[in-house]
Image (cartoon, rainbow, N blue to C red):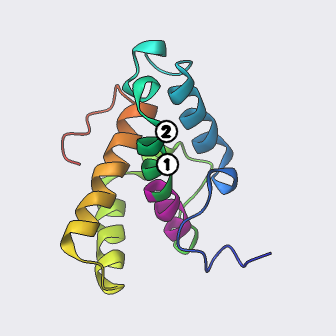
Amino acid sequence: MKNLHKVRSWPLSRWPDIDHQLWIDACAGLGAYGDQNPAFFWSPSWRRTIEHAYGRYVAWQALTPHDFNVPPADRLGPDAVTAFIEHLEMQGLAGASIAAYVRSIRAFAGAIAPDYDWQWL
């Protein structure tokens, strides 16, 4: 088995339990807003893109002092996302790639916690 701290993006099966369940529920129309949640209508391809991006975010969080017992929406604050962006920049990702990661993470956040104000993201 690979050392999961060296993997750039954690698969859905490796995500913290609460993150995993909130995402599955949103996509199945069982979470917040039920079948009115946008994630319920997203294509499998877009969902995989979001899973890869958020998987990279949680893999990065595992390398930093984050409490995975805190709901994911509370781990997606401005300071954490800014630090993640800086991490991606240090890895040499292009601005367009970083923007794509942020867009995908914003979609994830809106799906699992639609009542939060995500405009800053």
**Prevalent SS, magenta region:** helix
> Is residue 13 depicted above or below 71 in this figure?
below
- Whether residue 87 appears in this view of the structure is yes
Instruction: Answer with left or right where residue 13 lies relative to residue 67.
Output: right
Residue 24 location, quadrant: top right
Residue under numbered circle 2? 44
Q: At which x and y percent is residue 92?
A: 30, 85
Q: Residue at x 69, y 51 (%)?
A: 13
> Is residue 80 depicted above or below 16 in this figure?
below
Q: At which x and y percent is residue 94?
A: 23, 77
- Nearer-the-camera pick, 18 or 11: 11
| Label 1: element kind | helix
| Kind of residue at badge 2 | Pro
> Is residue 62 depicted above or below 39 in this figure?
below
| Contact between labelled residues 1 and 2, with CB atoms less than 8 Å apart | yes
Residue at the right extreme of this rendering: 1
* Label 2 neighbour load within 10 Å: few <14, some 14-19, many 20+: few
Q: Which mark is residue 48?
A: 1
Residue span colored magenta: 53-61
Q: Residue at x 54, y 66 (%)?
A: 9
Instruction: Answer with left or right where residue 121 lies relative to residue 57.
Output: left
- Nearer-the-camera pick, 80 or 27: 27
Q: Residue at x 28, y 80 (%)?
A: 89
- Nearer-the-camera pick, 36 or 86: 36
Q: At which x and y percent is residue 68?
A: 60, 54
* Label 1 neighbour load within 10 Å: few <14, some 14-19, many 20+: some
Question: Where is the N terminus found, in terms of image quarters?
Answer: bottom right
| Kind of residue at badge 1 | Arg
- Nearer-the-camera pick, 2 or 43: 43
Q: Is residue 97 magenta?
A: no
